[in-house]
Amino acid sequence: MDESSLADAGLRTTLPRRLILNIMENSAQRHLGAEDIYRALHESGEEVGIATVYRVLTQFEQSGIVIRHRFDGDKAYYELNDEEHHDHMVCVECGRVFEFIDDAIEQRQREVASAAGFVLQDHSLCLYGVCEGMQFSEKCSMPKESEPGIYQVEED
Amino acid sequence: MDESSLADAGLRTTLPRRLILNIMENSAQRHLGAEDIYRALHESGEEVGIATVYRVLTQFEQSGIVIRHRFDGDKAYYELNDEEHHDHMVCVECGRVFEFIDDAIEQRQREVASAAGFVLQDHSLCLYGVCEGMQFSEKCSMPKESEPGIYQVEED
DNA sequence: TTTATTGCAAAACCTTTGCATGTAT
DNA sequence: ATACATGCAAAGGTTTTGCAATAAA
């Protein structure tokens, strides 16, 4: 995912767009809210308006550069679309977001949709619970989001 | 689910609470937004403030009388908690919400969580697509929500 | 130069809250 | 009588929009 994705998406290569793309690529957190990005911009001295952040994120979503999530709260979270579909687990204690892939669930969803005559376009699955780290300590000790963190469960 | 559920929940039996419970029990739509309920109240001549609607729905959720969903948009939808867990399919064309139960998916979620050391508390799964009715006509011809509409897919 | 993009402030939208009044127990 | 519930209006948080100024093509 480099800057050419902007051109590919039919978006002019502007400073705000390059900056936001950069932040999302280099953030320790894969899942960022608009306000997080706005804050990161200002912390690095870049004066980009919050309206622009929202507009850019919306354009990024429409062109497939990012995926917008709305886990459980009232604000949206954005993550780069790495073309590898995954679902999410959110720790209700520490708020951290984990990703996982499970082919059996994916397959089953297709069957459910098909059985109901539904043409499946998309889905969102989010598990809520307490992560391993928070079960035994105040501080979460699970791998950071910036580390490889996709759990692939073995098929039976 | 009758009015005694209010007492069971430790909530005083007040007019607004009875009215809202009634609307949710008798609505053709199982999934209602706060505004929908507010409108229904006013259409039947009951003067209940929108703040009360929100407060009552929050209390209902906290006492397990209703379940709050936040499908994809920015507003919340509430449905009576019939004690039978199910997931949802939302038609992106007509907006109708369908319910389904799939034990294989439920089981697999437990396995995924467990494999990640996660203590699972809850989950939300929503499939998005085009319902059968909308594939062939302008008008959706799928069973109305008020009719029995839970799709139970056979296990393999 | 032409068209898209930005910034600002204002508004839209859904939801929550403070406070005085009213109601259930 | 007491504690809880309500209505109103005001405020909260997030996201969108109008419009004049600016920058990319």
Image: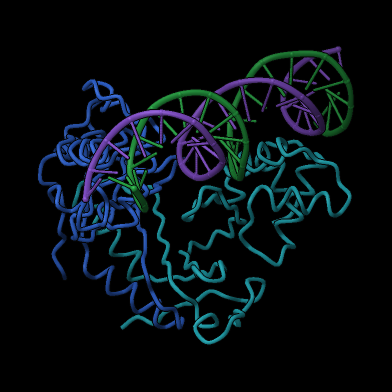
Chain colours: A cyan, B blue, C purple, D green
**Residue depicted at 16% across the width and 41% down the height:** B25
Position in image of residue A67 (x %, y %): 55, 51
Whole-percent x, y for residue C21 in the image: 41, 28
In the displayed structure, does residue A114 sit left or right of residue B125?
A: left
Who is closer to the viewer here, B15 or B112?
A: B15
Query: Which residue is rendered at x = 36% and y = 59% of the image?
Result: B124
Residue A142 x/y as whole percent: 58, 81
Q: Is residue B147 above or below residue A40?
A: above
Q: Quadrant of the C terminus of chain B?
A: bottom left
Q: In the displayed structure, would residue B101 be above or below residue B2?
A: below
Give the residue at the far bottom of this rendering. A136
The count of marks equals 0
Is residue B55 toward the left or the right of residue B26 in the image? right
Above or below, comparing residue B101 to residue B111 in the picture: above
Q: Is residue A41 left or right of residue B55?
A: right
Quadrant in which residue B7 is drawn: bottom left
* Residue positioned most to the left: B148
Along the viewing direction, whichever of B62 and B77 lies nearer the viewer: B62
Q: Quadrant of residue B13?
A: top left
Measured as percent of width and height from the top left, residue B134 is found at 25, 33
Answer above or below: position of B99 versus C1: below
Q: A66 or D3: which is nearer to us?
A: D3
At x 18% / y 55%, what residue is drawn? B82
